[in-house]
């Protein structure tokens, strides 16, 4: 199984980072991230294209770039399976955690057009 992680902003805050003050709490922030709608649309198209092309051979997860705990766990898992080295994991965490980044088994995809090639390579290498 090839694990793909797409870094994209969530639609709202309110994900526990503020103790429930924002989101549906005291402060309404429903339109806070509307400027990312185009990016979310593009990443959704990528998700559908990869799902159609590879089906159940891949697992795709969306992660908000502010969720560093989940991102770090993903890279630890990829280290455990020896898909990436410690240096690659550190470099990814330092340089590549940004909106619209795509990782395939822990490896940074240089562009959304290249990630299908990287997935094909990973599927060939998979036992």
Image (spheres, rainbow, N blue to C red):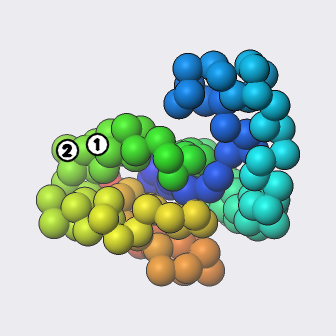
Label 1 and label 2: CA atoms lie apart by 5 Å
Disc 2 designates what residue?
80
Disc 1 designates what residue?
77
Q: Residue at x 77, y 47 (%)?
A: 32
51 or 34, which lies in front?
34
Residue 88 percent coordinates (x, y): 23, 67
Q: Residue at x 54, y 72 (%)?
A: 115
Residue 109 shows in this picture: yes
Residue 57 shows in this picture: no
Determine whether label 1 and label 2 are within 8 Å by CB.
Answer: yes
Q: Quadrant of residue 105?
A: bottom left
Find numbered disc 1 in the image and state the secondary structure of the residue it sits on: helix
Q: Can you say whether 105 is above or below 12 in the image?
A: below
Q: Quadrant of residue 125?
A: bottom left
65 or 103, which lies in front?
65
86 or 95, which lies in front?
95
Residue 53 percent coordinates (x, y): 69, 63
Q: Residue at x 75, y 20 (%)?
A: 26
Q: Can you say whether 74 is above or below 119 in the image?
A: above
Mark 1, Cα crowd under 10 Å, few <14 / some 14-19 / many 20+, is: some
Q: Quadrant of residue 31?
A: top right
Residue 29 percent coordinates (x, y): 78, 37
Q: Can you say whether 12 is above or below 9 in the image?
A: above
Q: Is residue 119 left or right of residue 37?
A: left
Q: Residue at x 75, y 52 (%)?
A: 33
Q: Is residue 28 left or right of residue 99?
A: right
């Amino acid at each position: 199984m090839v694990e793909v992680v797409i870094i994209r902003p969530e639609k709202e805050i309110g994900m526990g980072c503020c103790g429930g003050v924002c989101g549906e709490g005291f402060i309404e922030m429903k339109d806070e991230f509307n400027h990312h709608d185009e990016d979310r649309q593009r990443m959704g198209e990528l998700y559908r294209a990869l799902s159609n092309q590879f089906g159940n051979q891949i697992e795709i997860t969306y992660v908000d770039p502010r969720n560093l705990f989940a991102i770090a766990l993903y890279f630890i898992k990829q280290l455990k399976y020896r898909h990436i080295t410690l240096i690659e994991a550190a470099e990814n965490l330092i340089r590549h955690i940004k909106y619209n980044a795509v990782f395939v088994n822990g490896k940074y995809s240089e562009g959304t057009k290249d990630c299908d090639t990287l997935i094909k390579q990973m599927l060939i290498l998979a036992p």
